[in-house]
Amino acid sequence: MSTTYDVAIAGGGLGGAALAKNMAEQGARVLVIEHERQFKDRVRGEAMFPWGYAEVRALGVADCLAEAGRHHLNWFDLYVSSNRADHREVVPSTTHQLPFLTCYHPAAQESLLKGAAAAGATVRRGAAVREVRPGTPPAMIVEEDGHVETISARMVVGAGGRSCVARSSARFPVQRDLDDMMIAGILFENMPAAEDTLQGVNDFALGQLVVIAPQGGGRVRMYLCYHDATQPRFQGANDLARFVKSCEKAGAASTLFEDARQIGPLATFSCAHSWVVHPYRDGVALVGDSATSSDPTWGQGLSLTLRDARVLRDHLLSSSDWDAAGHAYAAEHDGYASRLHTFNRWFTEMFLSAGPDGDARRARAMPLIAEDPSRQPDSLFAGPDLPADEATRKRFFGED
Ligand SMILES: Cc1cc2nc3c(=O)[nH]c(=O)nc-3n(C[C@H](O)[C@H](O)[C@H](O)COP(=O)(O)OP(=O)(O)OC[C@H]3O[C@@H](n4cnc5c(N)ncnc54)[C@H](O)[C@@H]3O)c2cc1C
């Protein structure tokens, strides 16, 4: 059966848009269906680690992010409560020799989708994918202005994020960690944080982490990661004072907040890692959060999303058998996504477990890590291609 499109993508987030741009540049007929006519602040990821920046380059979307006003951070400071425990220069100390990249998420989405359209992709905004049907060919049901149509393609890609309709309607089973961590995030302006530094402020006693990610010009995205039972969700303007107090209690400097102004919503999400095993079947592939939504505490989601787009692109371009390419993508995805999951779980156990067990773990491991920092896997910076085996775990936890 002939189809109008080679690739039909449900969702124009960074994953969907980067894939669309790349496939259109290679001459594929690409359609992107994006629900939002104009992107707004959904409190999503805006700080990318160096390995994600390498994916940005491999996908050729660095110019789009530059147009969107991206900002570089070459330092990483880790505070344990209010004492600085690490001051790391990122570029020379990291596998990819790249800094952190921060960018306002709505601007990044806008710019990447514009790039996809300029490369020849058809981008339909304000339309919604209601259903995806695996098959030969696969199809998606799209609704726009009350009109419903069925669109088939050689491959349909679900890129709708954490609550992807393509994933649920195509009946991909979703696994989910039992996890009690939550993340609250907000954007500030006029905040005097060091403009070249990503800061993490870790409070072991509370099992909390504050992340301070400057975007340039005094704009700062701030996240608070905390255990669900320790406080209610932060939602809306009335919770701002409690958010600030909680960040200060965890060790963030009070001076940061003195003249800062909130310029986006305050919202809270579960940190539980969720994933689909083998995110491809019968013509439908899932990428980004739709395939694996990693614990946002560790800031790996954007990088993982772009890795998916790049790996799927490479398999599609290297084979005329797109069913085989879809399976090859899914198998490769499962490898790096499950290693990333393992590393993130170790970090949560080590740095965010409050109470006597966590204290004992840290008392054993941290002096050894201070002596030999290579005991701590550098996966956050270098990516999930490092070994995540039992020997690595034992070295990290000081059990070797
Ligand atoms: C609080 C929080 C903090 C985070 N912090 C970080 C961080 O610091 N660093 C990091 O790397 N990652 C972080 N992440 C993760 C990161 O935001 C995600 O991994 C990334 O945005 C996933 O991109 P995506 O393209 O898969 O999905 P999304 O960004 O969710 O994009 C999906 C797109 O699909 C569209 N869509 C959805 N359903 C439909 C439909 N039915 N029809 C049409 N369009 C549809 C949506 O409108 C949206 O534009 C964080 C996440 C959260 C929640």
Image (cartoon, helix red, strand yellow):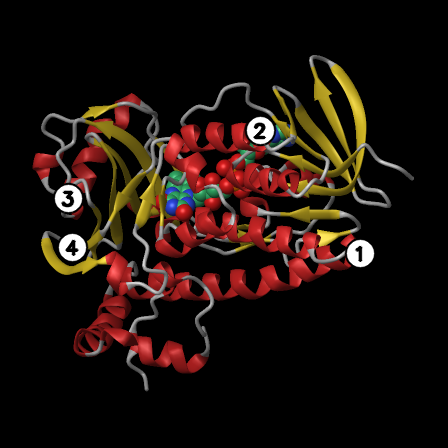
Q: Distance between the Cα atoms at labels 3 and 2?
A: 43 Å
* Residue that mark 3 sits on: 252
Select label 1 or label 3 by which is in front: 1
The Cα–Cα distance between marks 1 and 3, rounded to whole angstroms, is: 53 Å
Q: Nearer the viewer, residue 254 or 54?
A: 54
Looking at the image, residue 279 sits to the left or right of residue 109; the answer is right
Q: In the image, what residue occupies the spot 12% across and 34% down?
A: 192
Identify the amino acid type marked 1. Answer: Asp
**Which residue is identified by label 4?**
79
Give the residue at x 78% y 20%: 148
Q: Which one is earlier in the sequence, the residue at label 4 or at label 3? A: 4
Q: Is mark 2 within 8 Å of ligand 1?
A: no
Q: Identify the mark at residue 118; answer none if there is no mark.
A: 2
- Of tags 4 and 1, the one toward the viewer is 1
**Sequence-first tag of 1 and 3:** 3
How dense is the environment of label 4, judged by Cα within 10 Å: few (below 14), some, or many (20 and up)?
Answer: many
Of callouts 3 and 2, the N-terminal one: 2
Q: Earlier in the sequence, mark 2 or mark 4?
A: 4
Q: Which three-letter amino acid code belongs to the residue tagged 2? A: Ala
